[in-house]
Image (cartoon, rainbow, N blue to C red):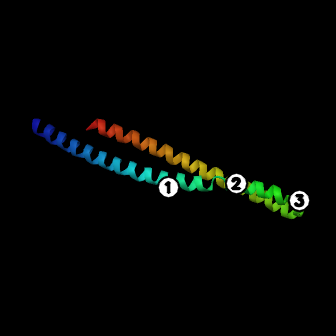
Amino acid sequence: MGLFDKQEKKLRKEFNKKNTAYCREGVKDIEELHDELKAAYENLENVNEEFATFREKIEQKLSEEEKGKMDYFSKKFRKIDKVARDAVRDMKDLLRNQKKRLREAMNDE
């Protein structure tokens, strides 16, 4: 029985090392993606406010039909902003969870 225990321990140790390496690689990739996504969002997060300001400036010159279109675009911009903000938040949550898994994998070694 001792022979199987030693082989099993060796296999588990190898598996844990590979698991830790994969987790590290995953954390690195997710961090890069999160940073890129966050930077892209930060560059565009003021677009919705800028559009609203622009809309207020020209609203008096627009017909009712054009005002309706501007309202439509304003709603779409707000929705796009929310989706982008949620994507950054979700990526941050994913990164936090992956870091937690990495710590657990490192403790198992």
In the image, what residue type sits under mark 1? Answer: Glu
* Amino acid type indicated by mark 2: Asn
Q: Which residue is mark 2?
A: 48
- Note whether 96 is above or below 31 in the view shown: above
Residue 33, how many percent across, how many down? 47, 54
The count of marks equals: 3
Residue 100 location, x and y as percent? Answer: 40, 39
Residue 2: x and y, percent?
10, 35
Instruction: Report helix, strand or loop for mark 2.
Output: helix
Callout 3 secondary element: helix
Residue at image x 22%, y 42%? 12
Mark 2 is surrounded, within 10 Å at the Cα level, by few (under 14), some (14 to 19) or many (20 or more) other residues, namely some
Nearest to N terminus: mark 1 or mark 3: 1
Q: Check if mark 3's residue and mark 2's residue have beta carbons within 8 Å.
A: no
User: What kind of residue is marked 3?
Assistant: Gln
Report x, y in % for residue 99.
40, 42
Residue 105 seen anywhere in this rendered image of the structure: yes
Residue 17 falls in image quadrant: top left
CB contact under 8 Å: marks 1 and 3? no
Q: In what quadrant of the picture does the N terminus appear? A: top left
For the residue carrying disc 1, how many other residues have a C-alpha within 10 Å: few (<14), some (14-19), or many (20+)? few
Q: Which quadrant is the C terminus positioned in?
A: top left
Q: In the rendered image, which residue does mark 3 sit on? A: 60
Q: Is residue 28 above or below residue 2?
A: below
Whole-angstrom CA distance, mark 1 to mark 3, is: 39 Å
Numbered label attached to residue 14 = none
* Left or right relative to 106: residue 53: right
Compared across the picture, whether 50 is left or right of 20 comes to right
Determine which of the numbered discs, if any, sits on residue 36 in the image. Answer: 1
Task: In this rendered view, identify the residue nearer to me: 3 or 37.
Answer: 37
Question: What is the C-alpha distance between the residues marked 2 and 1?
Answer: 20 Å
